[in-house]
Image: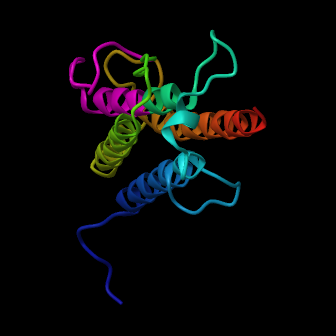
Amino acid sequence: MAANPNTSPTRERGNAEISLLLHLVDTAFNKKSWHGPNLRGAIRRVEAATAAWRPSPQRRNIWEIVVHCAYWKYAVRRRLLGEKRGSFAFKGSNWFARPSPVEPHEWEDDVHVLDEMHKALRAAVADYSPKDLQKIPKGGTFTAREVIAAIAAHDLYHAGQIQILKRLAAEI
């Protein structure tokens, strides 16, 4: 079989690394994973009332965690692409107070924002230049490779929190 003249071992390694990073991002979010529920799995069948429940007044709830995760997917994508701030679905950054009283359609809308931010992040990673993975994106302190891997870890961290909050809410 003849070698493809449009590929090189370096390019193939870079594409393999992008594929691996996409695999990490996807398994942490919504693809089958060995470790148990990923972020999307953790919120499957969670109703708005449960999403809005908090273990004490000063603690976060599932709903806020979901929007927080959506925000950080947006922030990582924006950083990778060198875009300016200000285009997230909600005004502010990091943590966002959610509506009270609870309206189920608002919970569903916010889960949709999470899904859309994941799709946009995934597209940015898929189109990312493998040679730029070792570079630090403008405004950052970590390489693109580190930031992409970290957003996957971020999803899993919060998936674990959500699992705990669901169990606590069920005991009340």
Left or right of 31? Residue 99 is left
Frontmost residue, 142 versus 115 = 115
Residue 29 lies in the magenta-colored region: no
Residue drawn at 54 percent across, 52 percent down? 45
Residue drawn at 29 percent across, 44 percent down? 120
Span of residues in magenta: 70-94
* Res 135 seen here: no
Which residue occupies the extreme right position in the image? 171
Provide residue 62's location: percent of width, then percent of height: 56, 31
Image height of 13 relative to 167, above or below: below
Q: Quadrant of residue 139?
A: top left
Provide residue 99's location: percent of width, then percent of height: 40, 21
Left or right of 128? Residue 42 is right
Which quadrant: the C terminus?
top right
Q: Quadrant of residue 73?
A: top left
Frontmost residue, 136 versus 93 = 93
Q: How many marks?
A: 0
Residue drawn at 50 percent across, 30 percent down? 63
